Amino acid sequence: MVAPLGKLESLIGHRFTDLKLLERAVTHRSWAHENLQGDKNEAHLAENESLEFLGDSILGLIIAEQLFADGPDRTAGELTAMKHHLVSSVKLAEIAGRMKLGEYIRMGRGEEQNGGRSKPAILADTLEAVIASVFLDSGYTSAKVFVRRLFSDDLKAVTPRSSIDPKTRLQERLQAQNIPAPSYNLLRSEGPPHKRMFYVEAVWEGGRATGEGTSIKAAEMVAAEKALGDLPAAAESASK
């Protein structure tokens, strides 16, 4: 059962003038196509893909502005790495998971049965759409307040070093354990050309982890991030 939007409003900390914007932000295309089959245009206007596009740009600007304000002495390269880390699909999915955003997503029965509420790509995309809905409802300042509160701990913790991408960190961690670098294998891809989902596995001596994303690279990053969480036990097992 989908949690009520009023509860999500409280979680966001924003009372919507137009609640339809928030409803659209949490509507996955699978729900729209399943419930609005008779009108493709209506289905398109009901799902959140266009809001994801807008939210991605708004989020990038807010994070860039905040990073510059917090560290005007940082180099452009350092700021870029930190921004990419904070707006990555891995980080967005992590934050969306912390706020239990999956409980509010409207999705088709098939997607839900396939574990859609916990899929990193869906969580990340929905969070971007929610950011866009706040912006459209009340403007940039309200969106900035929401994003800064949502990313507060991550903005405080981020450093150029911590912003190194998960694939590089995984390789370094493995090397420190005298384990060869991982290999990445494409398992499958699904969906229409404009919204392709890729499923990848990272394999290393003693373990494996899977990831999904809207590009092979994004899926590899998710797999590497999961591998980093699994690695201590896997490395210990491999060394025996």
Image (spheres, rainbow, N blue to C red):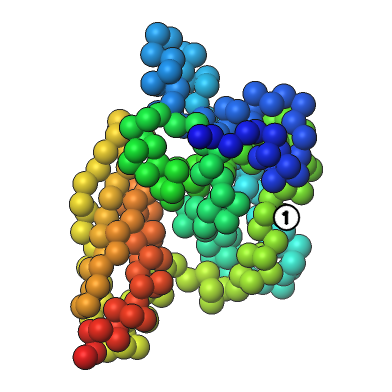
Q: Residue at x 65, y 33 (%)?
A: 5
Extreme residue in the top direction: 38
Q: Which residue is mark 1?
A: 149
Amino acid type at circle 1 is Arg
From what the image shows, is residue 5 above or below residue 204?
above
Residue 87 visible somewhere in the drawing: no
Q: Quadrant of residue 77?
A: bottom right
* Quarter of the image with the C terminus in it: bottom left
From what the image shows, is residue 64 above or below residue 191?
below
Extreme residue in the front direction: 1
Q: Residue at x 50, y 34 (%)?
A: 1
From what the image shows, is residue 161 above or below residue 222?
below
The percent position of residue 4, horizontal first and vertical second, equals 63, 33
Q: Is residue 198 left or right of residue 78?
A: left
- Total numbered labels: 1
Q: Quadrant of residue 54?
A: top right
> In the structure shown, which secondary structural element does the residue marked by tag 1 occupy?
helix
Q: Residues within 10 Å of mark 1 (few under 14, many from 20)?
A: few
The percent position of residue 94, horizontal first and vertical second, equals 52, 57
Residue 198 visible somewhere in the drawing: yes
Q: Is residue 119 left or right of residue 71?
A: left
Between 165 and 110, the residue placed more toward the observer is 110
Q: Quadrant of residue 142?
A: top right
Between 97 and 149, the residue placed more toward the observer is 97
The percent position of residue 40, horizontal first and vertical second, equals 42, 13
Q: Residue at x 40, y 29 (%)?
A: 108
